[in-house]
Amino acid sequence: MKYLSGALKFNQINITKKTSLLLKASFLVIAFSYIAYVAINHKGFNQDFLHSLEKISQNNIFFLLFIVLLMPVNWFAEAFKWKILVNPLQSISYFQSIKGIISGISMSFLTIGGVGDYLGRALHIDKINRTTIIGITLVNGVYQNLITYACGGAGLIFLFSDSLNKTGIYLAWVGLTIITLFIITLLFNIHFLLSFKKLSKHIQPLKAYSTLDKIKITLASLFRYSIILIQYFCILYALQIEIGFVDFFTGISLMLLLKSVIPRFSFLSDLGIREFSALLFFSNLGLNPADIISSTLLLWLLNILLPAITGLFMIAKKDFTKKPTSID
């Protein structure tokens, strides 16, 4: 009976994983199908797309250079967070942290389910076991998602502001503020959450960090989010697209929110998901689909593809003969 019970649980886990994988793959197919539909039905899409690339590369070299320079700033900020997260368990240098981040990008680029990110970061850490690395990586995601969801909530309020009266808008902002502050309070005072057994095993890594550490992680997450906003705004400016800040913030915050909540397939770092998300929101603002897709592809190229290629060299130089010391 014990064997049968164990087999049943094992089969349930397999079914869950298969269902999850199928769901993620379905979203990816839907995203690419929608992009193809928009491209096919937009007259002169190919010419517009090439024209978009020409405008960025020829007429706005300064903005293109500035966008490129923001790329290492973005990943230095992520490395700063990772160093803070790892240091209570093992002291690492900024260079080790950067290598872990870039290697994680590279390995997640060609793996399914985001497993590569854990493995890449683990390559440059010697004294922490795999389970702990997964835990602190999840903690990192919680803080980054907090910023994404809070800004996405603001974007939703802007999106529906025309259909709400002043009282409704006021209540929406108050509600968003209360929810955000409540989540921050829980993250900074996890003893409230430790009483829940199902949650306690997932949030144990948070006990290792001081209040100052959590403030630094939160601010670094907000800084990374701001860099994405600046990069995208500069790309649109380089494309000679005039758009108000509220409309821009609404579009980009909802794009990042949707990308965050859609089940991630992770292969090629979700290429197609951000393009799908951007088309949904920015096309309603009258932007040319070719401009939308070219701008999001440029972001993917700079923030994902180039670091992934760099990470391959770091992984190739890694000495895999050295056995890590596991700390429970």
Image: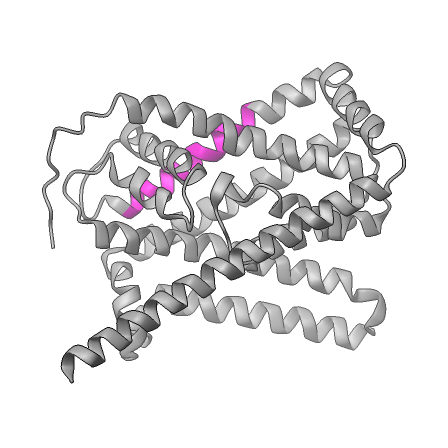
Magenta stretch: dominant secondary structure: helix
Left of 162 or right of it: where is 274?
A: left
Q: Work out whether 313 lies above or below 202.
A: above
Q: Work out whether 326 lies above or below 174.
A: above
Residue displayed at 12% across by 28% down: 321
Magenta-highlighted residues: 69-85
- Pinpoint residue 87: horizontal percent, then vertical percent: 23, 43
Left of 109 or right of it: where is 133?
A: left
Whether residue 146 can be seen here: no
- Pinpoint residue 138: horizontal percent, then vertical percent: 36, 55
Query: Split into 4 quadrants, where in the image is the N terminus?
Result: bottom left
Whether residue 16 can be seen here: yes
Residue displayed at 45% across by 44% down: 220
Query: Split into 4 quadrants, where in the image is the C terminus?
Result: bottom left
Residue 78 covered by magenta stretch: yes
Q: Work out whether 102 lies above or below 255.
A: above
Residue displayed at 45% across by 34% down: 75
**Quarter-of-image position of residue 293:** top right
Of residue 130 and residue 155, the one placed in the foreground of this image is 130
Residue displayed at 22% across by 80% down: 5
**Quarter-of-image position of residue 184:** bottom left
Left of 115 or right of it: where is 34?
A: right
- Pinpoint residue 271: horizontal percent, then vertical percent: 57, 41
**Quarter-of-image position of residue 50:** top right
